[in-house]
Image (spheres, rainbow, N blue to C red):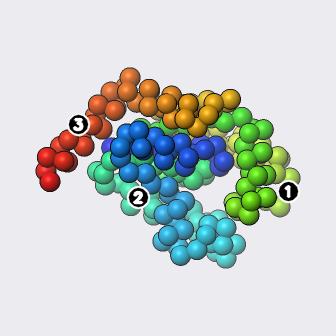
Amino acid sequence: MKVIIIGYRATGKSTVGLLLSKKLQIPFVDTDQLIEDTAGMPIKTLVARHGWETFREKETEVIASLCDGNLCVVATGGGAILSGVNRELLKNMGTLIYLKTPLPDIVERLKQDAQAEQVRPRFTSGNLMEETIAALEERIPIYESTADFMVDTNGKSIARVSDDIYQHLFEAGIVSDINETKNILKNKL
């Protein structure tokens, strides 16, 4: 069983996921980091050298590799849900949480990333706002139809977003299921 966080780039998936994993006392996995580890290079370099198609293939390989029974919180790349194969794999792994973040917040974070040299590969050479709007128009319906639960991050701290997710997981009985699985695994040792 996994708790999987989906949403557009720069919505806080990795930061929220890490905090949530600490609350749940289970490991945290970031699919983008796994791609970089297996490719031996940053995603920006991978995309520049081999293109988006190769990146998406590696993304599907990484997601498929997570299909074991291990408990963890997973932060996906923003476009992981574009593939029907990925959506099906993720849905079969656990509960999907969509971080819905306002457009101005996303664009501001992407601008800050660029200034901090943490550049994410661009989709186009056009205007960042236009690029983001176009991508969100395509992706928001997919995020919403794929997610089991949505958290609006507008005006909330990372801790508050993590608390909101935890509360939902608690009310849905998922925290109890996670704790029961942890106890079973502990008793097997």
Instruction: Identify the secondary structure beneath mark 1.
Output: loop
Marks 2 and 1, how far apart at CA: 33 Å
> Mark 3 Cα within 10 Å, few/some/many (few <14, many 20+)?
few
Instruction: Choose the circle earlier in sequence order: 1 or 3.
Output: 1
Instruction: Choose the circle earlier in sequence order: 2 or 3.
Output: 2
Residue 155 position within the rendered picture, expressed as x and y whole percent measured from the top left: 68, 29
Residue 140 position within the rendered picture, expressed as x and y whole percent measured from the top left: 65, 38
The residue identified by callout 2 is 64
Instruction: Identify the secondary structure beneath mark 3.
Output: helix
> Mark 2 Cα within 10 Å, few/some/many (few <14, many 20+)?
some
Q: Quadrant of the C terminus?
A: bottom left
Residue located 14% across and 46% down the image: 187
Q: Is residue 159 visible?
A: yes
User: What's the residue type where badge 1 is placed?
Assistant: Gly
Q: Quadrant of the N terminus?
A: top left
Residue 53 position within the rendered picture, expressed as x and y whole percent measured from the top left: 61, 66
Which one is closest to the eye, mark 1 or mark 3? 3
> Mark 1 Cα within 10 Å, few/some/many (few <14, many 20+)?
few
Do the numbered discs 2 and 3 sit on residues whose CB atoms are within 8 Å?
A: no
Q: Residue furthest right?
A: 127
User: What's the residue type where badge 3 is placed?
Assistant: Glu
Marks 2 and 3, how far apart at CA: 25 Å
The residue identified by callout 1 is 126
In the rendered structure, find residue 180 and report the number of the disc placed on it.
3
